[in-house]
Image (cartoon, rainbow, N blue to C red):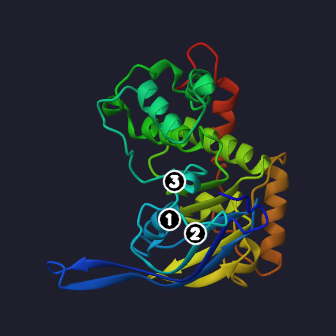
Amino acid sequence: MHATHHAPALHLHGVRQSYPIRMGLSRKEILHGIDLELARGTSLGLVGPNGSGKSTLLRVIAGVEVQRHGKVEVLGHSPDSAEVRRRIGWLAEDLPFPRELRAVDALRLSATLYGVPQSELAGRVDAYLERVGLAHARKLALAKFSRGMARRFGLAAALIHEPELVLLDEPTAGLDAPGFAVLEDLLGEAKARGASLIVASHLLTDIQAHCDRLVVLVDGQIALSGTPRDLAPEGGAVELELQGLGARALDEIEGEVRARGGSVLARFVSARNLVELYRRFRGKPGAPR
């Protein structure tokens, strides 16, 4: 397969996808003519309510669903190619491994299928189990994992081969406190090495910090597209994260907002504080897992 480094990471044109219903006598269309392009090294947030077609679209891009209409190019080629699929990292909603497998064996299997060289296999598996805070559970069966542990393991399985294109389906669903720190770190590293990212969620607040551009999917169609700033409605609610200010300074800022005709709807401690707390204690005796 020839290198196509100048091709976009993703190019979709007129993509439609449908599923058989009523004993296969008719079909229901889930995606209705999706046009989308993602430049190399950039990140896209795919936002929409449950049932909007986000997971279906990711499965099409990942090459898991091959029955489709329209044009699909991933890293310059068809996602049907096994070689292209090895260059993709995909976190599905549920783990695709037999639940009786031990974590170390399942991660080794994932790395092998993605083409990690045998000489690097053991070290890579150990490193990623450590990275996601599961080194202590390496010999534990996946069936015994909590939901949060399973999501962290899924991140390791999706990223262990350092893919060029990363697809994450609802990555924060069921994620525990250590997992949010893991997700931030791994996505930051993927972006730093030039990987392209697509992160899907029904919660905009979960993904917009990681994305250069957002696409809003509603009923299988792209309703809106633009940067996070572009999509912020004029006069609508926004979230502003601040740090380094005391209560008095924050009170003064609230007063200024009201003086300019705005309203302070809520004031709460950022969830990032929990992430930072985990980072500080990770690796210490008795640290949370």
Which percent across, then down, holds residue 177? Answer: 55, 38
Cα separation between marks 2 and 1: 9 Å
> Is there a contact, CB below 8 Å, between mark 3 and mark 2?
no
Q: Which mark is residue 58?
A: 1
Question: Amino acid under label 3?
Answer: Ala
Q: Nearer the viewer, mark 3 or mark 2?
A: 3
Q: Which mark is residue 196?
A: none
Give the quarter of the image for residue 257: bottom right
Which residue carries the number 3 mark? Answer: 82
**Please, which residue is most extreme toward the top here?**
285
Eyeballing the image, is 11 above or below 112? Answer: below
> Is there a contact, CB below 8 Å, between mark 2 and mark 1?
yes
Secondary structure state at the residue bearing disc 1 = helix
Q: Residues within 10 Å of mark 2 (few under 14, many from 20)?
A: many
Q: Quadrant of the N terminus?
A: bottom right
Question: Amino acid under label 1?
Answer: Leu
Task: Give the mark, 1 or 3, whose residue is nearer the N terminus.
Answer: 1
